Amino acid sequence: MAGRHPLSSSLLGLTLAVAVTTAVQAQWTEPRRFKAGGSPTIKVLAHIPLGGYFRVMDNEIEQDVNRPYTYVAQSWDRAGFSIISTKDYQFKKIYSWTIENPELHGGTGGMDGKYFKVKGKYYYVQSLQFGNSGPDAEVGAVIADVTMLPDTSKVRIVARVREKEYLGGFHNMFAYKHSDGRVLLFATISGPYADVFDLEKIVSGAPESSWLVGRVPIPAGPGMAMGNFGYHDFQLFYDPATHQDKFYGAGRGGYFIFDVSKIGTEQPKLITQIVGAAGVTGGHTFTPTPDGKFAVTEAEYQYAPLRIFDLRPGLEGKVNAITQPIGAWTSDWQSLSHNHEVKWPYVFVSAYEDGLQVFNMADPTKPFTVGWYFTCGCTDNKGFGGIPQFYGNTVFQGAFGVKVRNHDGLIVISDTFTGFWAFKMEGFDGWNGHDWSMPNISSAQDWDNGPEGAPKHAAGGGGR
C-alpha cells in the first residue's frame, strides 16, 4: 500500500490519486470473504456498539458548532433512537428512547431521523415503520424536544405524526427550511406521493388536521418497480440561480425533480426526470451537486454502481428525460453502495459491507476513490441471516447511514451490525461551497439565516 503523503486542507483529491492507486487495486482484485481495516487517509475517532445485528439504521448530525450531538435510529426491539455526544471529540451515548411496549410492535421500527429548529428551539424527528398487526401502524414519526441537551432529563416527546390513509409509517424523511420561511417535513409513505408536513404547526400544538400541507406526486410510467410505493428517498435544495425550492425524489420508475416553491398553494411542477436508464427500474437515493448541475444516484441491488448524471439537458429543456449516466463509481463491483452525502468534490458513502467510502467527483466522468474504512466486521454475502425476520444471503448489511458535519469535517457512520462510528479524513477539515467556487448548499440546513441566494425578505432553506 502506498505511503502517507502530505495533503493540503483544500485540495485533497488530486494529491491522493497516486497514494491510493495501489490500495484501490488491492481492494478490487484481492478476493476476500472478510474485509477489515482502511486506507491511511481515514482516521477512526470512535466506535460505540448499539445493540447487535440489524438494531441500527440511519443517522443525523447537528450542524450548530455549539451543539455536538448525533442521533442514531434504532430498530426492532430497540425501536427508537439514541443520542451520541461528540463534545471535545469525546464520544459517548448519553440518551436512548424506545417505543412503549416494543415487543408488541411488528415491522422495522426506527429508520430515519432529522433534526430541525423552530423559534429558537431544537427538535429531532424519528421516523418509525410498524406493521399492521400491532399498535402504532399509523404512526410515521415521533418528535422530541432536544433543546436542553446535554440535560437528557429535559428530552421529551412532543408529538406523534400519523398517516392514517396509508399505514406502515415513514421510511425516509427530509426536514427543510423552505424559501418562504416554513420548516417542512417531507416524508415517504406507502402511497404514490410524499407527504409534506408543517413542523412549526406540529410543535406549536396546532390542530392535527392542519399539519399536512401538501403532497408531491410520483409520475406514472414504465419500469414501475416498488409496487404501490412512491418515493423511497429524497432531498431538497434551494436553487439560487432559478430561485426555486427543488425536490429531488428517487423512487418508483426512476428519479424526479419537482419545483415545490409554492407547495401547499399550488401543485408541484415536474421540471425534469431520469427514467429509462439501463439497469434502473426504480430509484433509491438522488443527491444533486451544490450547483444542481449533476447528481449522484443509487439503485438498490447488488452489483449496481452509483451512477452520475448530467442534469443540464433536462433542466434546459433539451430532452424530455435523461436516460444515460455520464459516470459511475463503485467500491467493489460485487458489493453495493448505499446512502451518500455530496460535499463537492467529495462524495461520502455508507457502502454496506464496504463501510465508509469516499470518492472525488471533480470530473464527474472519472470519479476515483480517496479513502475508506470497513465498519461491518462481517463475512460478505451473509446479510439478513442473523435474525428470524429475514432469511437468505445478501449484501444488505453493514454501513447504513452517513453524515458529515460542515464546520469541522466530522464523518459519522451508522452500521447495522457494529453501531456508531466517527471518522476524520486527512486534509478534510470542514466544508464550505465557496471554497470550491460552488454555492454553499448541501443537505445541511441553515435554520437561522435561510438559504444562500434566497430573497432577503424571505427566510428560507438551502443549507450550510
Image: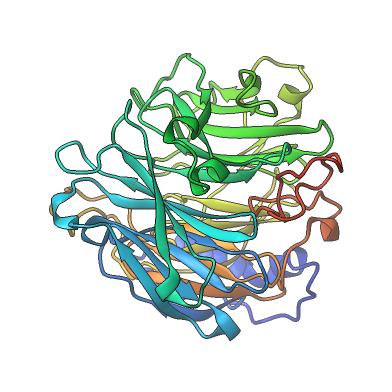
Residue 335 seen anywhere in this rendered image of the structure? no
Kindly identify the residue that appears in the image at 79 percent across and 67 percent down.
Answer: 11
- Between 48 and 67, the one lying in front of the other is 67
x and y, in percent, of residue 322 in the image = 64, 23
- Residue 115 vertical position relative to residue 45 in the rendered view, above or below: above
| In front of the other: 207 or 183 | 207
Compared across the picture, whether 175 is left or right of 461 comes to left
In front of the other: 165 or 254 = 165
Position of residue 21 in the picture relative to residue 27 (left or right): right
Q: How is the image coloured?
A: rainbow
**Residue at the spot 41% in from the left edge and 49% down from the top edge:** 159
Which residue occupies the foreground of this view, 30 or 95? 95
Quadrant containing the C terminus is bottom right
Quadrant in the rendering for residue 133: top left
Q: Position of residue 27 (x, y in %)?
A: 48, 65
Q: Position of residue 409 (x, y in %)?
A: 66, 70
**Identity of the residue drawn at 26% across and 55% down:** 383
Name the spot of residue 418 as percent of width and height, x first. Answer: 34, 70
Check the picture and name the quadrant holding the N terminus. bottom right
397 relative to 320, above or below: below
Please state if 208 lies on the left or on the right of 176 as rendered. Answer: left
Task: Indicate the quadrant where residue 270 lies.
Answer: top right
In this figure, what is the number of numbered marks?
0
Answer whether residue 100 is visible to the viewer in this image. Answer: yes
Q: Is residue 412 left or right of residue 327?
A: left
